[in-house]
Amino acid sequence: MKYNKIYSILLAGVLLTSCGKEFLDRPPLTQIPDDKFWRNEDDIRLYAAGFYSNYFTGFNTSFTVDYTPVRGYTFNDDLTGKNAQSSFESSVPGSRGSTSEADTWMGSYAGPNWNFAWVRKANIMIDNVEAMKANISSDAYKHWSAVARFFKGYEYSRLVSVFGDVPYFDKTVSDTATATLYKDRDPRGVVMDKVYDDFKYVLVNMRDNDGTNILNRYIAAAFISRFMLFEGTFEYYHGLDQIRAKKYLELAVEAGNLVIGSNKFNFTKDFKSIFSSESLAGHPEVLMYRIYDAAMSITHAIGSYQNGTEVVGVDGNLVLIKSFLASDGQPWQNSTVPNANSFSLADLVKTRDSRFEASFIDKVNASSATLLYGYKFASRDAITYIGKAYPPAWGSSTNTSDAPVMRYAEVVLNWMEAKAELAEHLGGAPVTQADLDKSINAIRKRPLDAVAVAKGVKLTSPLLLTAIPVDPSKDADVSALLWEIRRERRVEFVFEHTRLLDLKRWKKLNNMNFSTNGDYFLGPWVDVNAEIPSYLTTANIGKIRVKKLDGTIITWSGTNQAQMVGFWMVENATNRNAFTDRSYMAPVGQSQITQYADRGYTLTQTKGW
């Protein structure tokens, strides 16, 4: 018991801190002589804890945005900003990547830089656990080998999602093994087959329970469902390898089955509680979370950027709004819910899926470029401070709400999509109503909190195989069932990690070309004079515009306030620069190619670059 308590405190420190802070403020473990480390299971635990802040990021710390919702994942088709939209990379960078464990991510690719430090770190763990095999129990050997192989698979899954082909290192490489250090890229299929093998091992050998809020078989399986869904669908939709696509998707289903079949998780708490709670301990939908604690000076800023005052710069657009079903489970065009064809915020919160009301403030807000202000990651109490001084919990970088690292909704949606893809394209068993009831319909049954009920919010009707909605906006090349599964992901994961990666794996990156739909440049329906009269100033003459249903644009003239009713037009919003299919993958830096050449080796550039 004493040991478990000490370890829990130690691990909490890892979850609460970034690399290099507090007890981790010492030389990297990879520099500790082997005869002074790798002695017992305690040493392995300590080493493994060093991976947590890199992979279980949560809300990160302070104002850091790497891998964070709201502030990090801002490059996708759900969000629009003023002026020109941010663009894809247009040329090969001078340099890309490093060998530092502190290397940063690339937001426009939603993944890591060209860096293999964490692969090396995982290989060191694999090699040393293997060397310790005779000194630890069989259970410990299998578990820690699985932990190391999980982190290695995690890193390679992210690298492949960004770069495609990458060099695969199956063991720790010495600094003198130049030919191996400077090996060229391996095909992504070869790399992901190795990852597949690692993940299969993980599902069999990792412990079911290694302590509260610590990596275990179920948490690992949840991430495996994420990575295998990505790679399986990428392989399929990009026409790379149908056999691999099937294999990876089947593993996504297997991993999902493991979590679902455990009966350890459920949807019995309201949606907003997942993202705005001071403590997520015991939350039935959260498999893993990151703890924040002001007493330890470990805080974040994500709640602040959804407090109704802070400006994110890119906000939900009309295309995103229209993706939310009405509460009868129908697209707005087909719904019989009263006022379902209204796009005023007052009507949207009452007529749409309950996640709309839980994700967006129910009044237009000048701090949003689109006037649709997200507050999914702030509490209902947080927005009562608009115009006042915010408490530390919802202001600046002193937020202390816990961050969900992995939640059950993602598992069931990964599982459901993988099953549907297999059924429709790769010879899998047909999807059943029971499958939908375990996934999409279970999510839709989440209870509403008292505030939502008081506003008139309703639960969304279930998705029925015998009555799949006919959406006039559906892509012609996607089945009605897959369209609804994709819609469910979109509304469930607003502001989170999925959207850009989903577009990439579905080969739908053209959605980022906003010239394909004028709704990308619009916000909700607004009566400017009634809802946001502070905008009707002399300085804004000629700037403020709304669009009528017939497409007519009304510009503020200084005297036509009664006419300023329509869809809000984002100020000066224009499309991003043109891009091509090469943007699915990132180029490597010219200096990295030169470094290889200077030593007599070749590093192949990413296709198209």
Image (spheres, grey):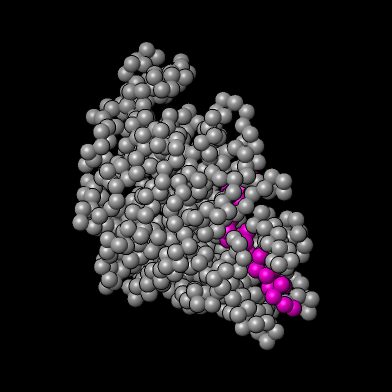
Specify the quadrant that holds the N terminus: bottom right
Residue 127, relative to residue 483: is it above or below?
below
> Which segment did they paint magenta?
39-66
- Image check: 488 left or right of 394? left
Q: Which residue is outermost to the front?
A: 1
Q: Residue at x 62, y 52 (%)?
A: 291
- Residue 85 image-quadrant placement: top left
Specify the quadrant that holds the C terminus: bottom left
Q: Which residue is drawn at 52% across and 64% down?
A: 219
Q: Which residue is drawn at 64% across and 49% down?
A: 292
- Image check: 130 left or right of 415? right
* Residue 93 visible somewhere in the drawing: no
User: Residue 155: x and y, percent?
Assistant: 55, 66
- Image check: 440 left or right of 388? left
Q: Which residue is outermost to the top?
A: 559
- Image check: 418 left or right of 137? left
Residue 473, relative to residue 436: is it above or below?
above
User: Residue 473: x and y, percent?
Assistant: 25, 46
Is residue 532 one of those drawn in magenta? no
Residue 150, relative to residue 405: is it above or below?
below
